[in-house]
Image: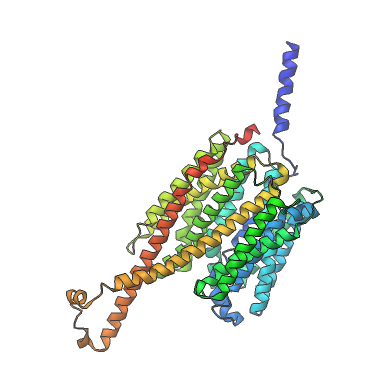
Amino acid sequence: MTTAASSGANAVPAVDAADQPRLHAGNQPLLLVGIMAASLLQILDTTIANVAIPHMQSSLGATADTVTWVLTSYIIASAVAMPITGWLADKIGGRRLFIFSVVGFIVASMLCGMAQSLEEMVLFRALQGVCGAFIPPLSQSFMLDTARPSRHPQVMAIWGMGIMIGPILGPILGGWLTESASWRWVFYVNLPFGILALAILLAELPHREGSARRFDLFGFAMLGLALASLQLLLDRGNQLDWFDAGEIWLYAGLALSGAWLVVIHLATARQPLFDRALFADRNFILALSFMIAIGVVLFANMALMPPMLQHLFGYSVIDTGLVLMPRGIGVLISMQLAGMLIRRGADARFVVAAGFLIVSFSQWQMAHWSLATDVRHFVTSGLIQGLGMGLVFIPLNIIAFATLPGRLRTDGSSLLNLARSVGASVGISVTTILLAANIQRGHEEIGSHVTSASLAAMDLATLDRFQGGADGIMRMLDNEVNRQAAMVAYIDDFYLMTWLALAAVPLAFVMRRSRPAAAH
């Protein structure tokens, strides 16, 4: 009896010992606030400057072609720097790297706000991109390391809110700051929130020392070459008419060569940039594929919706942001639901599959819009899509990290964030290319039906008698043809994303089932 009682008494501490965080924080809730503040600032800056580009162009004396480097420099610098997050964290320590990144991001933001020329702005945005690249993977890994395994679904839900809602809030906040103050406040707004995040991190972020690790210079150089060339191809292609220009062929050749060398090097090098154990984990590899799909669907939608609402439906920047906000509300709701389901033992694969089905249904709804669609349909489809995205994001991160050793979390997080960024870049570029091509084709098809016979049916065949008014009427007809062609092109993009989300559903069941977090 005594033996049974003592063994029973000893059983509880054994379970508790297995459910302990890897790192101990003095005030974990406050630390979460600081980490999320830093993460949200970095995510916001990927989209907040987009609406201010026209104002920057006139202020900095740039042309329409060159001012896009304000966005391109940030994206390229961030993509190239992100893969070395794990090595740097091991070299100087995760706490130091996180704090240095936040400090650098704040300083670079201030420099961007004070920039007086395009060259200065591009340089400071590149610096901002490098510093900001380390924040998402470090924030994710520190939130996992400082939380008990049983609370991983909850902290991932909190982290995911910033990742998913940041791109939605960015254009709203950027438009409001640009209209009410100046485009420079798009960068100055980072200062107060950045200082708050920095103060919390200095006080609460625990030390996480790494191990000595050789830097794989060749692997990093080839990966950086591939990523930078791919991003330049995607950004410059539309301006240079794609493969009609030699510059685009150069970028394509460099991207393919760099990617091929990276694959060979990772497979054969003694100490590659990323531990090969990452790529031996089936769940993690599939999670990378899913992250690319999430980047395509989420960010392509965020790139397509604002111009559609503003140009075809006449919404203002602020009204556009308010119409898109329900998508963020849906994300908030479903992330909490997903975390609760995982904690109660639900199979994460079914949750991910259900999320992609919901996203596919929302895209199917969007593919049935027309120029007569009212705000109720925009809000409903956005809310449904947010619900689906929230169900995908949290279980996917949990499955990806469930079978990874703690030492690989930072590298794994940097790769997952990089996959999402690459997916976003590819998705935005591909949907924009298809949109432009389909608008031209739609204009030709619809315009071919505007003939003398169709005009006669509308009693417009005798436009000559109106003299000067005839030109105005024909311009009105041409504008309406353009609007209809553009709407058809948007619908084609929405159908493409419908099938992409639907194709991701069966892949969820290829992943291994992970145990509930509470059991770890």
Residue 198, image x, y percentages: 73, 57
Judged from this view, the residue extending furthest toward the bottom is 467
Closest to the observer: 410 or 198?
410
Residue 229, image x, y percentages: 61, 67
Mark yes or no: residue 491 visible.
yes
Quarter of the image where one finds residue 444 = bottom left
Residue 332, image x, y percentages: 53, 49
Task: Say which residue appears at 52% left-offset and 53% top-offset.
Answer: 293
Mark yes or no: residue 34 visible.
no
| Picture layout, residue 118 above or below residue 41 | below
Image quarter (top left, top right, bottom left or bottom right) of the C terminus: top right
| Picture layout, residue 320 above or below residue 447 | above
| Picture layout, residue 57 above or below residue 145 | below
Closest to the observer: 220 or 426?
220
| Picture layout, residue 59 above or below residue 70 | below
Q: Is residue 193 left or right of residue 212?
A: left
Judged from this view, the residue extending furthest toward the top is 1
Image quarter (top left, top right, bottom left or bottom right) of the N terminus: top right
